[in-house]
Image (cartoon, helix red, strand yellow):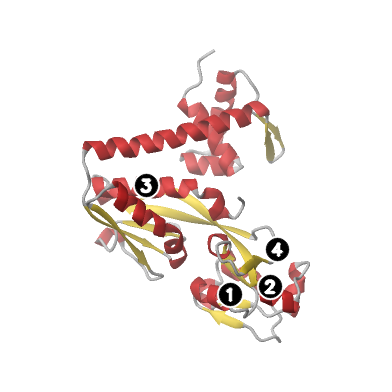
């Protein structure tokens, strides 16, 4: 029997974090059959059943949870060591531009300070915009997007998800009551998004429960939605990473209704840039650490 190796720990951690074969395959950059084979190999290496399979679901055994916990610590150590070694080799300098949607800018602001503290000559510029950013033309060095990349020159560094919930101000719920089911939303005022955003479930899901005969507020971005909801203007969808940090807001229903994929990207022409790599590694580590917070499942 071969001794377990790092790949055995990684596949167990990916399955624990993502909750499915497909999710683990996406994170590891392989297909589902490869994940299944690696899981079987890991169980043979550890000499124990790690996951009890049943239909499309699986449950971790106590041995599996112990290995996943150890793998999480190992992964954090590996990421920190990689960043530190690169920093020791060559101290990066200059500015790295990170383009992102406004919601991501709220979440990523602490990263700016972390990079500045760790690397005195390195700075991160967050570019918060909903307009298109062309990485191939050098509009930015790194992008955080909610739209799947199509340019073959773009490299996917990390994939994560944003959870979405319905939110209302405490005052609004006290005055109007909290609906027991989504159907109850028809009798309440909703904060809704404009047509360009409704193709995304995170913004368009609530439309099915809107009463066309009731007044509603339409917004073009989540920042406007947050302000109106905080002011008691109605119930509306927000990313959990935004809504959960607003002291005056409450989730209308406890569970997120959507999980939206988001991609951390850079152009292949930046592959040899040390300053971009340092920021990219710290960005990915930052997002990994906040994975549960971002999904709203913490």
What is the x, y in percent for residue 254? 69, 59
Mark 1 — residue?
A: 230
**Element under label 3?**
helix
How far is the residue under mark 4 from the one under mark 3? 34 Å
**Element under label 2?**
helix
Mark 2 or mark 3: which is in front? 3
Q: Residue at x 38, y 71 (%)?
A: 131
Mark 4 — residue?
A: 253
Q: How many marks?
A: 4
Q: Quadrant of the N terminus?
A: top right
- Residue nearest the observer in this picture, 284 or 139: 284
Q: Residue at x 45, y 63 (%)?
A: 106
How far is the residue under mark 2 from the one under mark 1? 23 Å
* Dot 2 or dot 1, earlier in sequence: 2
* Dot 4 or dot 1, earlier in sequence: 1
Mark 1 or mark 3: which is in front? 1
Label number found at residue 208: 2
**Element under label 1?**
helix
Q: Is residue 75 visible?
A: yes
Q: Is residue 214 above or below residue 222?
A: below
How far is the residue under mark 4 from the one under mark 1? 17 Å
Mark 2 or mark 1: which is in front? 1
How far is the residue under mark 1 from the one under mark 3? 32 Å
What is the x, y in percent for residue 11? 53, 33
Mark 4 or mark 1: which is in front? 1
């Amino acid at each position: 029997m071969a001794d377990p190796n790092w790949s055995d720990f990684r596949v167990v951690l990916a399955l624990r974090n993502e909750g499915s074969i497909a999710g683990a395959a996406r994170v590891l950059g392989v297909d589902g059959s490869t994940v299944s084979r690696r899981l079987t190999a890991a169980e043979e290496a550890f000499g124990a059943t790690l996951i009890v399979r049943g239909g499309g679901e699986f449950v971790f055994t106590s041995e599996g949870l112990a290995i996943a916990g150890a793998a999480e610590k190992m992964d954090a150590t590996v990421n920190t060591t990689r960043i530190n070694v690169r920093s020791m080799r060559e101290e990066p300098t200059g500015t790295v531009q990170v383009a992102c949607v406004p919601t991501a800018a709220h979440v990523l602001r602490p990263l700016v300070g972390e990079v500045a503290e760790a690397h005195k000559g390195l700075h991160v510029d967050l570019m918060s915009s909903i307009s298109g950013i062309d990485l191939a033309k050098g509009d930015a060095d790194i992008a955080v997007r909610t739209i799947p990349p199509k340019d073959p020159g773009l490299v996917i560094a990390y994939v994560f998800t944003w959870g979405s919930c319905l939110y209302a101000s405490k005052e609004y719920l006290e005055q109007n009551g909290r609906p027991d089911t989504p159907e109850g939303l028809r009798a309440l005022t909703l904060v809704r998004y404009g047509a360009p955003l409704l193709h995304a479930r995170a913004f368009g899901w609530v439309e099915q429960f809107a009463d066309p005969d009731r007044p509603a507020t339409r917004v073009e971005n989540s920042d406007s939605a947050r302000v109106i909801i905080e002011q008691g203007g109605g119930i509306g969808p927000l990313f959990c990473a935004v809504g959960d940090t607003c002291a005056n807001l409450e989730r209308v229903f406890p569970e997120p209704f959507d999980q939206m994929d988001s991609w951390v990207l850079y152009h292949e022409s930046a592959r040899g840039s040390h300053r971009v790599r340092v920021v990219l590694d710290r960005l990915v580590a930052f997002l990994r650490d906040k994975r549960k917070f971002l999904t709203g499942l913490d």
